[in-house]
Image: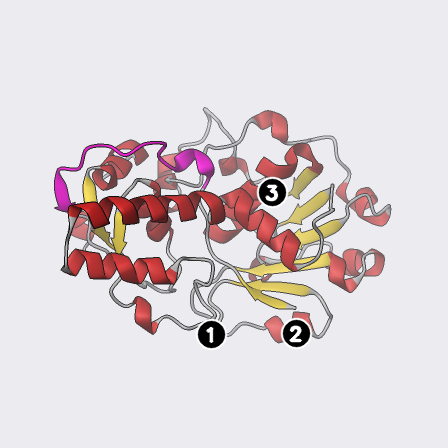
Amino acid sequence: MIFPITFSIPAEKIITEQTKKDKLVSNLIPGDTSTYIYDNETDYYNEYKRSKFAITTKKAGWDCLRHYEIMANGCLPIFKDIDKCPEKTLTLLPKDLLKECNNLYENYDDDKYNKLSEKVLDFLKNNLTTSSVAKYILEKTNHQNASKILFLSGDTNPDYLRCLTLHGFKETFGKNCHEYPKIPHLYKSKDIDFSKLYGKGMTYTNLLDEKLYDNDVNVIENIKNKVYDIVIYGSYHRGVPYYDTVKKIYKPNEIILICGEDIHHCDYDFWLKKEHHVFVRELS
């Protein structure tokens, strides 16, 4: 009942057609902060759109939002240490295609580039959108028929995996995915300075229409009345609100817990012994 999981990207962030390339490799270098010159998402994305390749790598964890941002903008990642990635980590990513990208950079050919770019973009659109990962969670836990979901968080601060996964469920279920508490930065707002958030708020913030949030919900009463088909904890390391109540009402396999941390001594065994479904991002 333990499964790997990765970040994802909102479908609206993926290009619909390629733009003209005037650079072989992007000047953005992971770890070199002098190259982090973009303060807004448009300029940041345009750097990848005009580049044929961009360097990416393992940071604190193997999974990195940069991988997805590069691919979403029609650029191919150079991920030279991908061979060292643990078998159970980054399992949703097309590792074989990423290796092809590395090889193509070393032995460049225009025709091969165009074909590989199309393959990578198609894979991203079909497998790594936020809604694709939401679907993956439901399929792995045999809850494909769920129609109403409760998504709980112990902390509303930015958390890439929680935020992107929640976005996927909101895209799929709308108000029938009720999150508590509300994650304000996921919603379109004139009152939030998104640039002050982690990663300057790029890619994962300012996405959802306020109409998708239902203020008139009594979470405790709904849990007690088993209004929801399943309960998902977006980051069990950052809190499991109402767990004592949830476990009394819901069957163990109707509770799903997600871990999106980089480096940690994960206590997923504790939750597995309770027979819950557990999804871990950095699963070695």
Magenta residues, dominant SS class: loop
Q: Is residue 209 visible?
A: yes
Q: Position of residue 66 (x, y in %)?
A: 33, 50
CA separation in Å, label 3 and label 2 = 26 Å
Quadrant placement of the N terminus: bottom right
- Which residue is denoted by mark 2 in the rendering? 270
In this view, the residue in front, 40 or 192, is: 40
Up the image or down, 257 lies above or below 226; here it is below
Amino acid beneath label 3 = Phe
Identified at 35% across, 62% down, the residue is 96
Mark 1 / mark 3, whichever is N-terminal: 3
24 inside magenta stretch = yes
- Which residue is denoted by mark 1 in the rendering? 284
Q: Position of residue 36 (x, y in %)?
A: 21, 46
- Which residue is denoted by mark 3 in the rendering? 169
Q: Quadrant of residue 253?
A: bottom right
Up the image or down, 154 lies above or below 87; here it is above
Magenta region: 10-25
Amino acid beneath label 2 = Phe
Mark 3 / mark 2, whichever is N-terminal: 3
Q: Residues within 10 Å of mark 1 (few under 14, many from 20)?
A: few
